[in-house]
Image (cartoon, rainbow, N blue to C red):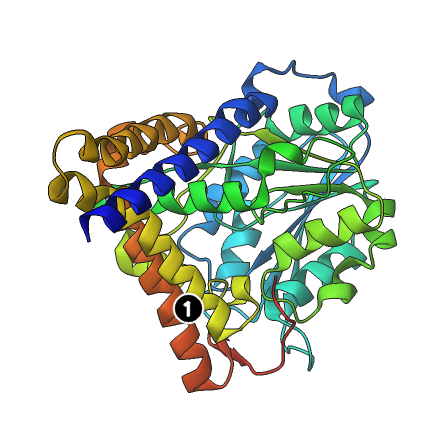
Amino acid sequence: MEQVLLLWSALVFILWLGVLFQWAVGSGRIEDLRELAVPDAEGLPSLSVIIPARNESTAIADSLTSVLRGLPRNGEIILVDDRSLDGTGEIARTVGSGDDRLRVIRIEDLPEGWLGKNHALNIGAASSAGEWLLFTDADVHYHKDCMARALKFALDRGFDHLVVAPEMRTVGFWERTFEPVFLILLLTRLRAWRVNDPGSGSFLGIGAFNLMRRETYDRAGGMEALRDEVVDDLILGRNLRRTGARQGVVAGRDHLWVRWNVGLSGLIQGVEKNAYAAFGYRPTRAAAGCLALAAVTVVPVLSPLALSGWGALPGIGTWFVFALLYRMVGGFTDAPWTYFITFPLGSLLIVYSILRSALLYHLRGGIVWRDTIYRDHGKGL
């Protein structure tokens, strides 16, 4: 048994060493938005910011204020109030009172075959006039130079679609345990650092900041092409890449930030919609993924305790790799790197979230999100 554990521990160490190498080489290819020059607003093309919002009364005022403050001179904001019951639209109108750059569109009904957010984005884009579109969320906060710098960066590099990766701000133990693991797994799987390479098949989309040329969006079929897709931001990125868009990603620390979800229960509920979709709604794939994740993150905890002498070195080495990965992921979250010791716990929380998402999906016969059940939807990733 010890020999099996030693072999597996060594294999896991090699695996994580490979991931670390990818991060070390790749993360240096993702530029920092803070280091880019602030352009002359007069030279920027027109921009339409589309914000879908449903029951966002607690976040919309601060978020929308920051968007208005950072909107380039020839920009517009279209906030789509998607059947909100908490006064989201009224709050938005109050925030933008007297500012004709903001329009609020109210949706009363959801057409069959659409997810609410996707439909809201479709309505917003169809109602906009900008040469460039920016899809963003109703709880994201903007530095005043964020949009201008991102737009100029996209123009200078010839990108058709630019993702700004937001800084994930955290509060408390559970958020700082859950979110770094989520980021490491997601960005590694998507090979985010390869998105800037036009010869790469890697793609990315983040709901907090998807900036694209209108003609590129139209060529990819817009939101009509993913009306029922749950993982809408990523699949939008995939569609854009497949139809020839040149994509880029830049880190948005201190320029774009969001508190993703509040507390452990909020985080688990927050991935409920997407976790099972990431496995294509296939129970065998989800189960295999959960087993593999537990096996490559819990072993480093067990092996140094179960093996003595030289046998403990692979497990100890894996802990060092975890620490270095957390230093690198610090460009995307404010969680202290010392939380690397919670990596196994965070990964088990991710496993639980995936299994919970799958179980609820099958019990309900579909996805429940924002008080709406979707029985017919896309195939996921």
The answer to whether residue 60 is left or right of residue 238 is left
Q: Please count the marks in the image.
A: 1
- Residue receiving disc 1: 287
**Image position of 281 with respect to 250: above or below:** below
* Quarter-of-image position of residue 267: bottom left
Query: Which x, y percent locates residue 286?
Result: 46, 67
Quadrant in the picture for the C terminus: bottom right
Residue 370 visible here: no
Query: Which x, y percent locates residue 94?
Result: 53, 50
**Image position of 214 with respect to 75: above or below:** below
* Residue visible at 49% across and 55% down in the picture: 91
* Residue visible at 32% across and 46% down in the picture: 8
Check disc 1 and give the amino acid type. Ala
Judge by depth and name the residue closer to the eye, 306 or 142. 306
The answer to whether residue 26 is left or right of residue 44 is left
Judge by depth and name the residue closer to the eye, 115 or 1. 1
Query: Which x, y percent locates residue 199?
Result: 78, 34
Quadrant in the picture for the N terminus: bottom left
Label 1 crowd (10 A; few <14 / some 14-19 / many >=20): some
Which element carries disc 1, helix, strand or loop?
Answer: helix
The answer to whether residue 185 is left or right of residue 64 is left
* Residue visible at 59% across and 60% down in the picture: 231
**Image position of 30 with respect to 5: above or below:** above
Residue 101 visible here: yes
* Quarter-of-image position of residue 101: top right
The answer to whether residue 39 is left or right of residue 192 is right
Query: Which x, y percent locates residue 225?
Result: 77, 65
**Image position of 186 with respect to 289: above or below:** above
Judge by depth and name the residue closer to the eye, 50 or 211. 211
